[in-house]
Amino acid sequence: MASWLPRTSGILSRFATKSHAGRNAGSRLRSTQTASETLVNVPETRVTTLNNGFRVSSEDSGIPTATVGLWIDAGSRYENAKNNGVAHYLEHMAFKGTSNRTQMELELEIENMGAHLNAYTSREQTVYYAKCFESDVPRAVEILADIIQNSTLGEAEIERERGVILREMQEVETNLQEVIFDHLHATAYQGTPLGRTILGPTENIRSINRDDLQNYISTHYKGPRIVLSGAGGVNHDELVKLAEKHFGNLGTEYENEIPALTPCRFTGSGITVRDDKMPLAHIALCVEGVGWAHPDNIPLMVANTLIGSWDRSFGGGANTSSRLARVAYEDNICHSFQAFNTCYTDTGLWGVYMVSDPLSVEDMVYHVQNQWMYLCTSVTESEVARAKNLLRTNMLLQLDGSTPICEDIGRQMLCYGRRIPLPELEARIDSISAKTIRDVCTRYIYDKCPAVAGVGPVEQLPDYNRIRASMYWIRL
């Protein structure tokens, strides 16, 4: 599954004496100019659409390696209660042999190329990608085309993979962060497709058959819903020719009605699984955010950065930029916390995931909500300026290498229909002020019904009505 948590890092304040101030200011100016020039000189992201609606998007950075992949607008959100888990099951079956290659031949070919072939499924997207040498891009594209169009889906392989997925589900159950967010989705989007897990329930995994897999492919793997993304040592014109050769005949017609996203309503609610044998309480608290393309998404990303993240193993404590981190460090009320902003097409979850000692749970929840109210009413320009700088840094650091860039291109093509240029993103972040943050946070946080999920020794977790009552301040 895809990693959804944003990466954050701390900032160390540096104080200069007056005699060094001029030199430091000049260095900062030169650094800013260099950063701006770097943004402008980023290689162009080129996009071509084939006659069948299949899109090719790439960025050529001229390095000797490349990443190419297929981003498909289909995930667990397009499933129903009966076939929930089929998208993830299909991802597993993609590497089990095609009509042109046995599983062994596929694995040997990838190994002999020195390439890496991987895939993952999220709630709205399925991804297959390969990292290889620049010279092997044509073979990598041909392999990707083969596995999504010609998979044999053999009965023996389906049965064998059933056991693999069931074991994977057991492993996921031991990852409490995954468990918490499955519970959070289940309560926040109860009764809707986003409330279901990506892996699906055990009874579905035991019953999914070849017809279910083929039906999912024929329903969703259509030209207009797939993007071939490339980054690193890729020539766009050559990539387009490869796409025309291998994907040009991909269908556009639907046998039944065209699949559409089911609106997923957000429900303020809570779910707890108490287990006093566990040493730590894992809790997630969130409000409804916005979809990828919503104009308030960037301000919410800055607000997310203002909350930040912290772990006891971090070197910074009282000097971190996050107010919540300073409280967590000084009062010793949690082991770690992580702000998150999870976006989907038309909705999202904006909140904090925290891990605390049983006796500190109530204090930690109080301080999280206190910081939310601070964002709505009192955040300052200097705090927002620092958060904007940190957000820009983190976003650029995540684009280090051909694979993250390829992923960024593919995801943005599905979410926005284009890749947002870095100078445009920089300008949109720069336009945000403290008033923008206060207004946007008031709109989505203040006096709103949150969703809460807790696992472990959660006796001290306040009941839902108390948490709901702390979503506003009484102002005289």
Image (spheres, helix red, strand yellow):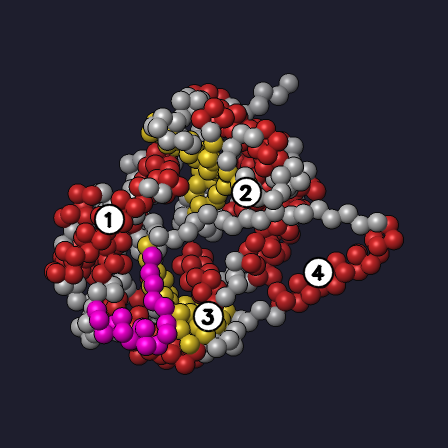
- Which circle, 3 or 1, is nearer the viewer? 1
Q: Position of residue 292 (x, y in %)?
A: 46, 50
Cβ–Cβ below 8 Å for labels 4 and 3? Answer: no
Q: Kindly identify the amino acid type of the residue bearing the numbered disc 4.
A: Thr
Task: Mark yes or no: residue 245 visible.
Answer: yes
Q: Kindly identify the amino acid type of the residue bearing the numbered disc 1.
A: Arg
- Residue 50 placement: quadrant: bottom left
Q: Which residue is mark 3?
A: 231
| Horizontal side of residue 27 vs 384, given as left or right | right
- Which circle, 4 or 1, is nearer the viewer? 1
Q: CA distance from mark 2 to mark 4?
A: 31 Å
Label 3 Cα crowd, 10 Å radius (few <14 / some 14-19 / many 20+): many
Q: Secondary structure at mark 2?
A: loop
The majority secondary structure of the magenta stretch comes to helix
Sequence order check: which comes first, mark 3 or mark 2?
A: 3
Q: Secondary structure at mark 3?
A: strand
Q: CA distance from mark 4 to mark 3?
A: 26 Å
- Which circle, 2 or 4, is nearer the viewer? 2
- Residue 87 placement: quadrant: bottom left
Q: Which residue is mark 2?
A: 313
State the residue in front, 237 or 465. Answer: 465
| Horizontal side of residue 193 vs 424, given as left or right | left
Rendered position, 392 above or below 446: below
Which residue range is magenta in the image?
A: 103-120
State the residue in front, 380 or 5. Answer: 5
Q: Which residue is mark 1?
A: 167
Q: Quadrant of the C terminus?
A: top right
Q: Residue at x 25, y 63 (%)?
A: 94
State the residue in front, 259 or 84. Answer: 84
Q: Residue at x 47, y 29 (%)?
A: 357
Q: Which residue is mark 4?
A: 32
